[in-house]
Image (tube, rainbow, N blue to C red):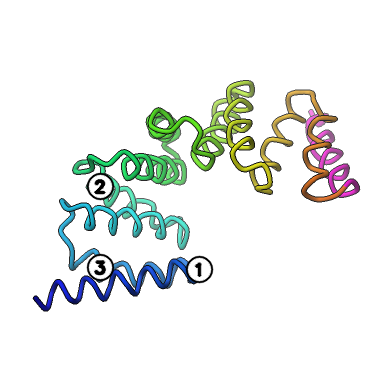
Amino acid sequence: MTQSLDVGRLERSLEWGLRNDLPSAELVRMLRPLVKATDGATTSGALARLRLAEQLLLADPRSAWEALVLLRGVLDVSTNRELTRRALTARGLALTIMGHYRAARAAYVRALWIDPFEPVCAHNLGHLLIVKFGALDAGIRWLEVAHQSLPDDAEIVASLAHALTLSGAPERARRLLERCVGPSSAQMHIDDWSKALARP
């Protein structure tokens, strides 16, 4: 009875922390005892491990290996599509951080098979395809999916604008950026990217 009460208290404390946007390092400290107190084979235990992995990746990229171990456990037991999708997206990020780009791409593709319009995963895959595989057209398609879902997200807009500049569409890139950073800043970014392209 005491353990279930402790789990309930830990879960309530975590929910409060998530609602109040506590820093990831603080959420990691809150999640560790919850993970210890729950069974990873249960939905609540798997969710606690997924959340810990996600927050570890945000708090300190050097924790990518620990996050991968947690995510493997989640994927082994999860029958929930949303939990699985989130775990695959986090797995893709952890693998990217560790330099395992093909495995990261496979994780993102599996996540997008579950939800083809999930913007964070689409953005991560698009960026990965462009930067690590040189697949500009495919990367732009995924960045456009992300942008359609989150049109005001500055990071997604910047990634798409940069990719469009690389593909020879600087005017479209400038128009996208202007909505986020204004005309002068947008032009400055386009000029910088264009100069970088012109370098031998």
Q: Name which of mark 1 and mark 2 comes first in the sequence.
A: 1
Where is mark 1, residue-wise?
Answer: 21
Q: Which mark is residue 150?
A: none
Where is mark 2, residue-wise?
Answer: 74
Q: Position of residue 20 (x, y in %)?
A: 49, 71
Q: Amino acid at mark 3?
A: Leu
Q: Quadrant of residue 52?
A: bottom left
Region rendered in magenta: 183-200
Give whichever of 167, 46 is nearer the camera.
46
- Relative horizontal placement of residue 199, taking residue 126 as reference (left or right): right
Whether label 1 touches label 2, CB < 8 Å? no
Does residue 5 sit above or below 87 in this rendering? below
Distance from disc 3 to disc 2, alpha carbons, whole Å, reads 15 Å
**Screen quadrant of the C terminus:** top right
Q: Amino acid at mark 2?
A: Val
Distance from disc 1 to disc 2, alpha carbons, whole Å, reads 24 Å
- Relative horizontal placement of residue 151, taking residue 3 as reference (left or right): right
In magenta segment, residue 161: no
Q: Amino acid at mark 1?
A: Asp
Provide the secondary structure element on which disc 3 rests.
helix
**Screen quadrant of the N terminus:** bottom left
Provide the secondary structure element on which disc 2 rests.
helix
Give whichever of 165, 117 is nearer the camera.
117
In magenta segment, residue 189: yes
Whether label 3 touches label 2, CB < 8 Å? no
Q: Name which of mark 3 and mark 1 comes first in the sequence.
A: 1
The structure residue drawn at horizontal position 55% and vertical position 29%, both measured from the top left corner, is 129
Neighbourhood count class around disc 3 (C-alpha, 10 Å): few under 14, some 14–19, many 20 upward: many
Where is mark 3, residue-wise?
Answer: 34
Q: Position of residue 99 (x, y in %)?
A: 45, 40
